[in-house]
């Protein structure tokens, strides 16, 4: 499957149609195809990538409100998928998708950061964003799940479009060239430099993270619902964000120490 350049709405529809019947590979099929792909077998490379393109689209859609067209996000995700194939280590007992998802997201995020511009946010916009973030936390505490944009908009008495625009403005306010600490501009690193240094963990770190997640998934099956929820929030499995003990305590209405006890009990 070739990388798609400048996909418009019609082209995207055709592309989605092309990949909707992509096969699901078993662990054994996947390993055999990757072996061949790493030896330069073009047919194996195509087959492996084709099987995972629907996942790239699914991930790309999560970022389509942040300034880049969906077609461009898919292109970047496909590049990340290729990078994952290059870096994947067959000696590790993990599925390819578990590993590839990090590279797909990484490539998309870097593309978003490349096109980010400095946008000065007015005090009114900052106040609106503060209301939105407070509503987000309130809904998270109430429902014990990540709130939808529609729920946030309703609680803030704003339109869905206003909420989306507030998030986009907050992201675009950071310039890659701007110093992290403006008061020490000469010595301060730029946001871009920090991202470049910290955004790409080594392949070994990826594998360790995957193995940790797989272990925790086994733990979840024997935990109570509350214990499992605490572990997921603490390790970032719920929404990709890692919550500290105090934040989790606020969500459940219990003390920080009680959260620590429940967490420790769950992982014993």
Image (cartoon, grey):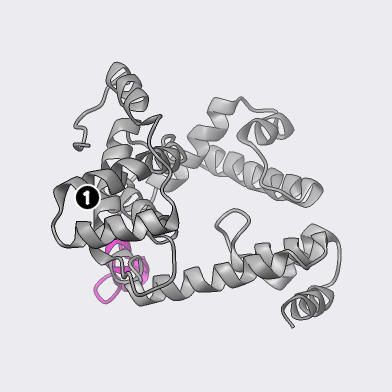
**Quarter containing the C terminus:** bottom right
Q: In the structure shown, which secondary structural element does the residue marked by tag 1 occupy?
A: helix
Residue 22 magenta: no
Viewer-side residue, 66 vs 179: 66
163 w.r.t. 97: above or below: above
Determine the residue located farthest toward the bottom in the rendered image: 268
Q: Position of residue 43 (x, y in %)?
A: 18, 45
For residue 258, side relative to residue 108 (left or right)? right
Q: Please tell me whether residue 192 belongs to the stretch shown in magenta.
A: yes
Q: How many discs mark residues in the rendered view?
A: 1
- Lateral position of residue 262 relative to residue 86, left or right: right
Q: Which residue position holds label 1?
A: 45
Q: Position of residue 242 (x, y in %)?
A: 59, 65
**Left or right: 119 in relation to 149:** left
Please, is residue 14 above or below residue 167 in the view?
A: above
Q: Residue 7's image quarter? A: top left
Q: In this rendering, does residue 115 appear at all?
A: no
Q: Main secondary structure of the magenta part?
A: loop
Q: Which residues are magenta?
A: 176-194
Q: Is residue 160 visible?
A: yes
Residue drawn at 44 percent across, 35 percent down: 65
- Closer to the camera in the image, 63 or 268: 268
What residue lies at 32% left-to-right and 26% top-to-bottom? 18
Q: Quadrant of the N terminus?
A: top left
- Give left or right: position of 156 versus 108: right
Q: Residue at the location (28% across, 59% down)?
A: 34
Say which quarter of the image contains residue 256: bottom right
Residue positioned 74% across, 61% down in the render: 229
At which x and y percent is residue 178? 29, 59
């Amino acid at each position: 499957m070739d990388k798609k350049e400048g996909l418009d709405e019609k082209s995207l529809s055709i592309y989605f149609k092309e990949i909707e019947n992509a096969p699901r590979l078993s662990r054994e099929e996947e390993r055999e195809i990757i072996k061949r792909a790493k030896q330069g077998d073009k047919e194996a490379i195509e087959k492996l990538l084709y099987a995972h393109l629907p996942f790239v689209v699914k991930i790309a859609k999560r970022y389509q409100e942040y300034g880049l067209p969906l077609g461009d996000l898919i292109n970047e995700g496909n590049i990340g998928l290729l990078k994952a194939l290059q870096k994947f280590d067959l000696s590790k007992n993990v599925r390819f998708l578990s590993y590839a998802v990090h590279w797909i997201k990484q490539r998309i995020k870097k593309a978003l950061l490349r096109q980010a511009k400095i946008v000065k946010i007015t005090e009114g916009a900052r106040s609106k964003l503060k209301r939105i973030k407070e509503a987000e936390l309130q809904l998270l505490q109430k429902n014990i799940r990540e709130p939808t944009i529609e729920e946030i908009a309703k609680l803030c008495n704003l339109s869905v479009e206003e909420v989306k625009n507030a998030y986009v403005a907050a992201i675009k306010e950071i310039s890659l060239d701007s110093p992290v600490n403006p008061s020490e501009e000469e010595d301060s690193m730029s946001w871009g430099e920090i991202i470049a240094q910290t955004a790409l963990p080594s392949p070994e770190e990826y594998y360790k993270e995957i193995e940790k997640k797989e272990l925790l998934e086994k733990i979840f099956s024997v935990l109570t619902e509350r214990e499992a929820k605490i572990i997921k929030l603490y390790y970032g499995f719920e929404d990709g964000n890692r919550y500290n003990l105090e934040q989790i305590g606020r969500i459940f209405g219990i003390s920080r120490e009680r959260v620590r006890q429940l967490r420790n009990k769950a992982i014993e």
